[in-house]
């Protein structure tokens, strides 16, 4: 039996293994300070005792004690955070302290920490539970004080995107009853069929001012809300629970307003780029149209003939060409005006769907324009062919080609229509189909009418 006896060290090791477990590795302990002392190395030693007189030795090592921002005193009540360990040399257990807060502040901080840990374990902060926030909502439900700076900052940004609509629920955002007021706002706006997103916001303030946003019932209301919620609380230090539960957290009311306004401005920029690309594509389609190119070549050839023989026809051809170009430009301008009207009729609630419809309409317009250009070109070609036949009919070269000649004055400017236009000794310019000859008049005789 004596051979089975434990040594003191063995007993201490067994106790150490039983006490140094995860459940006692990160705990808060409240008590009154006694036996306070410190070492030259900066370590602080004290005991915590409760109203029953039970004492717990504590060691506050220097690397943790440096963060202490108030003076420890015997008799003061504190909250100490640390782990339970066993000191082998004495065989006693103690609390190795990592953080200390005064009783008044510590009680509030401890409750908040415990609430955060509780909600986190339940999954209220998990990303996979967060709902997507619409980039461009039909209507924004805003919960804030109607008299605070937060609503002015938020609306100042929203006004840069007039398409956005806001429904305000005036709520108390500070003091007793604030959490209940915000909860009421969430419940009412969540039932509104045209509210796509709810924004809870207020400006900065002390921890006491913002404590209503750490309310457990408010956190659960945010989590259970079917409408996506944005929390934009202007805090400086600790993050309120409403930020952690919300589907999207933004730092300030201004940032919340800017978030939605910039989404609208980005979409309008994309629409402008789409319109510019469409206009460029339509002009390129016009220029690459083979019928249009062929028509230009025919126009050039006909213009050369008209310049040589019938100068007055040139003006008519220019008029036709200008009419065609004007018609094409007018058609393009009409399509662009129609596009602009469609753009003005866009509404945020149906913007994405209407953009898709608009793209289909543009494709149809492009096909109609191509068909219109082809039809216009065909009609003009027919008219050109008719003009060409008319020109050929009156073309004097066609007469000369049949063996006839025409006589002009020596300088070739005046057509000689009668024998009385010349006298013996004159020089006459005689035109053939393939050239001319200068002839000397030896004799003239006028034929008497029969």
Image (cartoon, grey):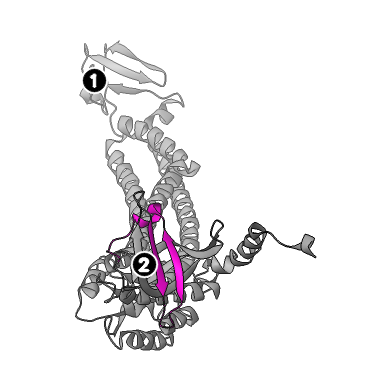
Q: Nearer the viewer, mark 2 or mark 1?
A: 2
Looking at this rendering, what residue extends furthest in the front direction? 2
Q: Is residue 164 left or right of residue 125?
A: left
Q: Position of residue 331 (x, y in %)?
A: 37, 56
Q: Is residue 56 left or right of residue 157?
A: right
Q: Residue at x 30, y 12 (%)?
A: 439
Q: Residue at x 45, y 48 (%)?
A: 377
Question: Can I make out residue 424 in this image?
Answer: yes
Q: Residue at x 22, y 17 (%)?
A: 411
Is 362 magenta? The answer is no
Question: Can I make out residue 245 in this image?
Answer: no
Q: Position of residue 288 (x, y in %)?
A: 46, 41
Q: From the image, tell me which residue sits under label 2.
A: 35
Q: Compared with residue 286, is residue 28 higher up or lower down, i.e. above or below?
A: below
Is 64 magenta? The answer is yes
Q: Secondary structure at mark 2?
A: strand
Between 53 and 167, the one nearer to me in the picture: 53
The N terminus, quarter of image: bottom right
Residues under numbered marks 2 and 1 in contact, where contact means CB atoms less than 8 Å apart? no
Q: Residue at x 26, y 26 (%)?
A: 415
Q: Which mark is residue 409?
A: 1
The C terminus, quarter of image: top left
Q: Report the magenta residues as a range.
A: 44-72
Between 450 and 1, the one nearer to me in the picture: 1
Q: Is residue 100 left or right of residue 115?
A: left
Badge 1 crowding class, 10 Å Cα cut-off, few under 14, some 14 to 19, many 20 or more, is some
| Residue 136 picture quarter | bottom left
Q: Position of residue 213 (x, y in %)?
A: 35, 77
């Amino acid at each position: 039996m004596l051979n089975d006896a434990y040594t003191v060290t063995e007993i201490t090791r067994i106790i150490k293994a039983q006490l140094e477990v995860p459940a006692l590795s990160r705990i808060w302990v409240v008590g009154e300070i006694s036996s306070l002392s410190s070492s030259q190395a900066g370590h602080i030693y004290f005991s915590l005792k409760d109203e029953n007189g039970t004492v717990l030795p504590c060691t506050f090592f220097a690397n943790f004690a440096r963060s202490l921002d108030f003076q420890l005193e015997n008799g003061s009540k504190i909250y100490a955070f640390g782990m339970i360990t066993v000191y082998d040399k004495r065989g006693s257990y103690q609390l190795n302290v990592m953080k200390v807060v005064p009783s008044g502040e510590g009680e509030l901080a401890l409750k908040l920490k415990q609430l955060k840990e509780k909600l986190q374990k339940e999954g209220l902060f998990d990303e996979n539970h967060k709902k997507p926030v619409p980039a461009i909502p039909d209507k924004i439900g805003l919960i804030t004080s109607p008299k605070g700076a937060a609503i002015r900052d938020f609306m100042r940004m929203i006004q840069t995107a007039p398409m956005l609509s806001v429904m305000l629920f005036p709520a108390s955002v500070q003091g007793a009853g604030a959490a209940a007021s915000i909860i009421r706002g969430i419940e009412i706006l969540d039932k509104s069929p045209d509210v796509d997103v709810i924004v809870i916001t207020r400006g900065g303030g002390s921890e006491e001012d913002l404590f209503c946003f750490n309310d457990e019932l408010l956190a659960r209301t945010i989590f259970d809300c079917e409408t996506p919620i944005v929390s934009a609380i202007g805090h400086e230090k600790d993050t309120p629970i409403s930020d952690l539960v919300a589907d999207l957290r933004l730092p300030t009311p201004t940032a919340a307003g800017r978030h939605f306004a910039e989404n609208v401005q980005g979409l309008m920029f994309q629409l402008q780029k789409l319109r510019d690309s469409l206009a460029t594509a339509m002009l390129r389609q016009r220029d690459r149209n083979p019928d249009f190119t062929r028509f230009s070549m025919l126009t050039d050839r006909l213009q050369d003939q008209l310049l040589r023989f019938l100068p007055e026809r040139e003006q008519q051809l220019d008029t036709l060409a200008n009419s065609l170009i004007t018609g094409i430009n007018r058609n393009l301008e009409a399509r662009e005006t129609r596009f602009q009207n469609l753009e003005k009729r866009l509404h945020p609630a149906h913007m994405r769907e209407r953009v898709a419809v608009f793209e289909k309409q543009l494709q149809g317009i492009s096909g109609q324009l191509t068909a219109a250009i082809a039809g216009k070109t065909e009609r003009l070609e027919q008219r050109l062919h008719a003009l060409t036949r008319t020109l050929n009919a009156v073309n004097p070269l066609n007469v000369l080609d049949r063996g006839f000649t025409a006589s002009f004055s020596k300088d070739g400017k005046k057509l000689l229509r009668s024998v009385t236009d010349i006298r013996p000794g004159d020089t006459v310019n005689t035109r053939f189909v393939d050239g001319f000859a200068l002839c000397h008049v030896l004799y003239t005789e006028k034929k008497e009418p029969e």
